[in-house]
Amino acid sequence: MPIHETDLLAIGAGGGAYPAAFRVAQAGKRVVLVDPRGAMGGNCLYDGCIPSKAVRETAGLYMDWQRFARLGLPGNVRPDYGAVVRHKDAIQERRYAQHAQELATLSASADIRLVCGVARLVDPHTVRVESSLGEEMFRCGSILIASGSEISVPPVPGAGLCLTSHDLYRPQPALQSLPEHLCVIGGGYIGLETASFLAALGSRVTLLQKGDQVLNGMDPGMVRLLVPLLHPRIRILTGVEVVEIVATETGRRVHYRQNGQPQSVDADAVLMAAGRRPVIPEGTEAIGITTARTGILVGPTLQTRFPHIYACGDANGRVPLFHAAVRQSLVAAHNILGGHRPLDQADFATVPTTIFTMPAAAYIGRTPGRPDAGPLVEGSYAFSGDARAQILERTEGEIRLFFEPGSLRLAGAWVVGIDAGQLVGQIGTALAGGMTAYQLAAFADQHPMASEGIGKAARSLF
């Protein structure tokens, strides 16, 4: 079997892979991307953030319609979930075409190609790729592992009767009609977001959470503010141990224990949202790369024990978010082009994170609920007094900013409510720039926009 020479082989074609691949190819290097779907976009586009947010935004429009029904809009409008799904599918199709065009444009002037196949590490410089066309061997100057993550399904009897986020959000998904009653197992961001979307569109939702808090590991103060603001059609049960899922004549029945007492809930469908786990390519551990339950072990340079082998995005599990993967991918590209010297580093601690519930919650940096938070000075701004929030009748929630004592340098923040996902990005820019409460307070942000609340939260300290 002939061995092909390449400067970089990327395992995966999502946010952790293609930014590096493009940057390295633009520098005149030979690049190969290997992905089992043979398309760019990764989990985010296939069954993750893009399709789920397409559903969310349509649900948000429906909620706005209901909110302003007093203005004379018809109040008995019912959403067509099939049309929502078709809109989601169209967005995915459009973005796949966009990525394909980007690759075609670059490949016209650079040595880069995408192979539809499965990659396996043979040794620290050799990768075997199996595809429908057979096997190929590649001798690689650098290897970038960006193989993403997959759905984790716990060994609960009857788990195969459940839907997963893949069934809801992939192109042409399994769920094509709105369930009257949905049971969600798992109170992480995927379960809570999906509960919000479908409740907004008309479903009743029962969410079963194993621990005492949904969004486990996130700031308890933020979660305590968020949960009461969720749609009243969502019922959250905590401290639950799911025992079994069984089929009934009309749907599914979930047997569980709460406070030691056996109970059950009947639903039209059950969503298993117990989390995701990294996909580790075959051969990774065999060649001596260290892995853990959370993923491949890397530091800020994204290098494994082999300086020429990098792991980015969900594969390393440090910050399993698309935008974090993109930044990591570029860090890897810079270090590859620098001869594997640490020319660039990823900052894992200050990546903005948004939970796209309705309303949303977002956070960044150090907040009081973190074990390593240390002493912090807090400023706040309630959306009840915000002009934009009042105009849109979405006055729930607030901005909380956290500063280092003495210097009042911004250390972190969380936002619950209107425009949370936008605001945390603006706050993140200030955090990355080392801004203080004085500087934030002095900035004249636009009126009437929710972002002016950032300066007002800072001014609450003075």
Image (cartoon, rainbow, N blue to C red):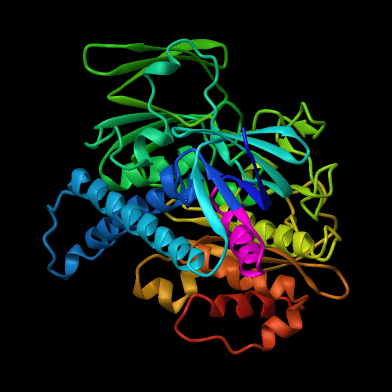
Image quarter of the N terminus: top right
Q: Which of 317 and 74 is in front in this view?
A: 317
Figure quadrant of residue 125: top right
Q: Measuring from the top left, give residue 255's x and y in whole percent.
A: 43, 13
x and y percentages locating residue 221 in the rendered image: 64, 50
Horizontal side, residue 82 vs residue 123: left or right: left
Please give left or right for residue 267 compared with residue 226 in the image.
left
Q: How many callouts does the rendering have? A: 0
On screen, residue 381 above or below 294: below
Q: In which quarter of the image is residue 350?
A: bottom right
Q: Is residue 462 visible?
A: no
Instruction: Quadrant for the C terminus, please.
Output: bottom right
- Give 150 or 11, whichever is nearer the viewer: 11
Name the side, left or right, on which 433 lies relative to 148.
right
Magenta-tinted stretch:
13-31
Q: Residue at left 40%, top 63%?
A: 101
Residue located at (64% from left, 74% from top): 457
Magenta segment includes 11 = no
Picture coordinates of residue 454 (x, y %)?
A: 61, 75
Q: Which residue is drawn at 47% across and 75% down?
A: 386
Residue at the farthest front position = 2
Residue appearing at x 27%, y 18% in the figure: 251
Residue 287 in sight: yes
